[in-house]
């Protein structure tokens, strides 16, 4: 029986459930005899950092694509058709997703960091072709960024 309680950590575990806690830095100041709460001094930076969170669906698509490509490369499965059967997905869905493995590493890095253009999401990749040359990909994605 696991009956650990953690004080000051972000996770406390008991035998029945797991509780997560979040630390929010606050500053209490006296104003006119009353205590008031002030936001952290770097609130603008915190908001900016939150704005650059990665698109989770797009990251999940990248993850699946590279995992499936690895299955094919290692001979575990023969094709996207076999993956689609095993996963219970449409063949077109698997093939469209696997096109993400052809992206320029700089584009993949920007997706993982959350700095890709706003219009560049998983749905965009299903509706548009991806150029074969990385330099053409970068130009196309730069055009998307410039149009926003």
Image (cartoon, grey):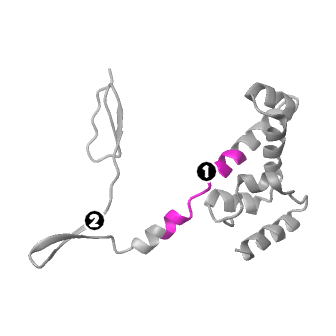
> Which residue of the protein is positioned furthest toward the top in this rendering?
1
In the shown orientation, is residue 8 left or right of residue 88? Answer: left
In which quarter of the view is residue 28 placed? bottom left
Q: Earlier in the sequence, mark 1 or mark 2?
A: 2
In the shown orientation, is residue 142 left or right of residue 117? Answer: right
- Of the pair 12 and 56, the residue shown nearer to us: 56
Residue at disc 2, secondary structure: loop
For residue 1, above or below residue 117: above
Residue 11 x/y as whole percent:
35, 41
- The local crowd at label 1, few if under 14, some if 14 to 19, many if 20 or more residues have their Cα within 10 Å, is some
Instruction: Give the residues in magenta.
Output: 48-62
The residues bearing labels 1 and 2 have C-alpha atoms spaced at a distance of 29 Å
In the shown orientation, is residue 99 left or right of residue 39? Answer: right
Residue 84 x/y as whole percent:
80, 31
For residue 77, above or below residue 103: above
* Dominant SS in magenta: helix
- Is 50 within the magenta? yes
Residue 68 x/y as whole percent:
77, 37
Q: Which residue is mark 1?
A: 56
Residue located 80% across and 26% down the image: 85
In which quarter of the view is residue 13 placed? top left
Residues at badges 1 and 2 in contact (C-beta under 8 Å)? no
Residue located 72% across and 72% down the image: 145
Residue 10 x/y as whole percent:
35, 46
- The local crowd at label 2, few if under 14, some if 14 to 19, many if 20 or more residues have their Cα within 10 Å, is few
Residue at disc 1, secondary structure: helix
Q: Tag on residue 80?
A: none
Q: Which residue is mark 2?
A: 26
């Amino acid at each position: 029986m696991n009956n650990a309680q953690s004080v000051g950590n972000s996770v406390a575990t008991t035998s029945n459930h797991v509780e997560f806690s979040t630390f929010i830095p606050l500053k209490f100041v006296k104003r006119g005899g009353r205590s008031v709460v002030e936001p952290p001094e770097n609130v603008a930076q915190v908001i900016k950092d939150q704005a650059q969170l990665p698109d989770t669906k797009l990251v999940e698509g990248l993850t699946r694509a590279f995992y499936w490509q690895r299955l094919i490369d290692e001979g575990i499965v023969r094709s996207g058709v076999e993956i689609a059967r095993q996963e219970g997905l449409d063949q077109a869905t698997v093939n469209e997703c696997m096109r993400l493995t052809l992206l320029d590493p700089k584009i993949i890095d920007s997706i993982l960091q959350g700095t890709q253009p706003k219009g560049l999401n998983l749905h965009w990749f299903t509706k548009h072709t991806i150029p074969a040359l990385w330099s053409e990909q970068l130009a196309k994605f730069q055009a998307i960024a410039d149009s926003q």
